[in-house]
Image (cartoon, helix red, strand yellow):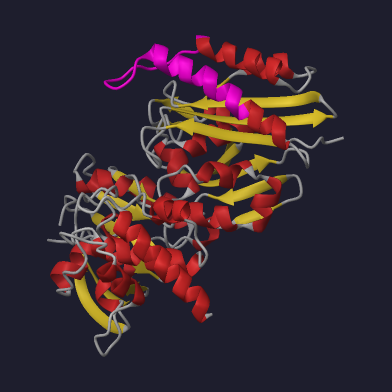
Amino acid sequence: MKPAPFIYHDPATPEEAVALLSQHEDAKVLAGGQSLMPMLNMRFVVPDHVIDLNGVAEISGVIDTGNTLEIGAMTRQCDLMRDPGVNAKTPIIPEALNWVGHFQTRNRGTVGGSLCHLDPSAELPCLMSAYDAVLTAHGPDGARDIPFAEWPLAYMIPTLGPDELLTKITVPYWAAGHGYGFVEYARRHGDFALIAVAALLETDGDTIRRASISIGGADVSPVRLTAAETALVGASLGADAFKAAGEMARGIEAMSDAYVSSAYRQRLAATLVERALIKAGECATGSA
Amino acid sequence: MADTRDIEVIVNGESRVANVETRASLGDFLRHGLGLTGTHMGCEHGVCGACTVMVDGEAVRSCLMLAVQANGHEVTTVEGLASADGSMHPLQEAFWKHHGLQCGFCTPGMLTSLTAFLRDNPDPSERDIREAISGNICRCTGYQGIVDAALEVAKTMQKGS
């Protein structure tokens, strides 16, 4: 018996969950539990109330709307990896999820849980940043949409009111045949990344038409390398363009900690941006 | 007053009814509530893999799930792998044959993880197996015997199918 005592709630609908959040002062939302449960076991968090979303069926599963992929916040990471539509239209998602923990934790871990936990080096926030995903939150007054760029408020804190619940993530599709690359470096596979990079490329023949590069693990939340994205558009696919883009990552803000310096993270970011772009370039078959 | 719930869980094929504190982990419920001490609690924050059990057939960390969340679900622990007559599961046989354990602390988690993994990946490479157990820490064997055992079972399973 490790967590301190709490009152357990298991709502069946998002509305019930929001009502519980409004009623109770010191409540924590339990999604897949792969981050909150360790924190409860260690008593890093000692909430009076735990609101378990595992019975809220309607916020689980994916919908292909034609232009976007809608992911219910309680969709398990393993289910996203197995979904044929996800693999066909957003192949970078399963590619990146391979790096998330281990298969046993992906069996419980959810997409929404990771986005709300907002660990600086987690893969899912990095991905959603690359996609400019839109996050839908339900509150007492209804739903509101939050672009990913506005989602992180501070270190591990999303811009979510105390009575709001993340219910849906909308990922806009990139053109068929777009290139993608997700690479990271961690000291052990399955561990949190020192640096993770998601790269997406749309091409027309050898010419890059659209680019997105997001770096996780460097700063408190994922960083978009917008200068490199702009420089890549119109450039030809190839080692020179990718190397130059990587060099632009050398100047990003990067944290230092007990293990690695900020200079090391910057250097790693430059290398991994280049590698992610090389991967993306190799699999881009042209979208024209 | 402790917050409790009545739960019914199918554990190794048998219905178990209990009143549990809502803060109790599934692993602690299995060990203390049901006396199934085959499931080992190691790090209790999801890193070591020793407490892995199968819930509805999927390998999960029993330290990262509340017992109350298993209500209405099926749980298989290491005790549920052997046949009713006591004969060992092929994976257990192979662990014995290839010295896939020494102190035995990680073994329940290795066996439950690999049972689920081999069911979903009947033709794994050595690398696949090493990745599958990358979330199960063993400090005795150096993993070699465990990998050999899993590879042999995968081969046998294919011949059998």
**Predominant secondary structure, magenta span:** helix
Report the span colored magenta: A251-276
Residue B158, image x, y percentages? 51, 74
Q: Residue furthest top?
A: A251
Q: Which residue is drawn at 34% across and 44% down?
A: A35
Residue A141 visible in the snapshot: no
Residue A61, image x, y percentages? 57, 57
Let me know if residue A275 is in the magenta part: yes
State which quadrant residue A230 falls in. Answer: top right
Q: Which residue lies furthest to the bottom in this view?
A: B85
User: On the rendered structure, is B87 left or right of A116?
Assistant: left
Q: Quadrant of the C terminus of chain A?
A: top right
- Relative to residue B113, is residue A49 depicted above or below? above
Residue B135, image x, y percentages? 34, 50
Q: Which residue is drawn at 78% across and 42% down?
A: A176
Q: Which residue occupies the foreground of this view, A58 or A183?
A: A183
Q: In which quarter of the image is the N terminus of chain A?
A: bottom left
Let me know if residue A220 is in the magenta part: no
Q: Which residue is drawn at 58% across and 12% down?
A: A247
State which quadrant residue B34 falls in. Answer: bottom left
Residue A263, image x, y percentages? 41, 11
Residue A256 visible in the snapshot: yes
Q: Which residue occupies the foreground of this view, A196 or A124?
A: A196
